[in-house]
Amino acid sequence: MTDLLSPPHHNGHRKFTRRRERQMAFLKALGETGSVAHASAIVDVDRTTPYTWRNTLPGFASAWEAALAEAAARPRRRAYFTMAPGRMNDRQLLYVMGKFSR
């Protein structure tokens, strides 16, 4: 599955390795949250980036659908309150604060 998520390697091998790691982390977060915006915040990528990956990488769209199916099968819970305060990074904290300020 990993081979389908990133373009072939070239001289910028390190860059592609980080991208693949972010793609995998995004899919894991998507499977846990069911939210593209929240998963993007967790992985610290712009929320439009995963859509670009989905449209350009052959295996990413099917992995995306599998992650959403996994999220749908999970019991719903308030993820904001189950996360330990010391484990949130700044971007996650700002995301949660923004949800409650509206």
Image (tube, helix red, strand yellow):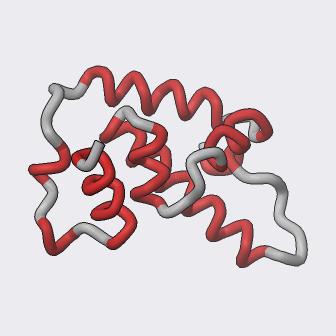
Where residue 94 appears, as percent x and y from the top left, is 33, 62
User: Residue 34 appears in which quarter of the rendering?
Assistant: top left
Residue 78 in the image: above or below residue 44: above
Taking the spot 72% from the left edge, 42% from the top edge, the residue there is 52
Question: Is 70 left or right of 79, judged from the image as shown?
Answer: right
Q: Of all residues shown, which one is farthest toward the right?
A: 11
Tell me which residue sits at (44%, 55%) in the image.
41
Say if 57 sits above or below 9 in the image.
above
Q: Position of residue 10 (x, y in %)?
A: 88, 69
Relative placement, left or right, of 68 versus 63 is: left
Q: Is residue 35 left or right of residue 33?
A: right
For residue 25, side relative to residue 81 (left or right): right
Q: Is residue 32 above or below residue 7?
A: above
Residue 24 percent location from the top left of the image: 52, 52
Tally the marks. Answer: 0
Is 41 in front, or is 5?
A: 41
Residue 21: where, in percent of width, then height?
A: 56, 62
Location of the C terminus (image quadrant): top left
The residue positioned 80% from the left and 53% from the top of the image is 7
Q: Residue at x 60, y 27 (%)?
A: 62
Nearer to us in this view, 47 or 7: 47
* Residue in front for this viewpoint, 41 or 94: 94
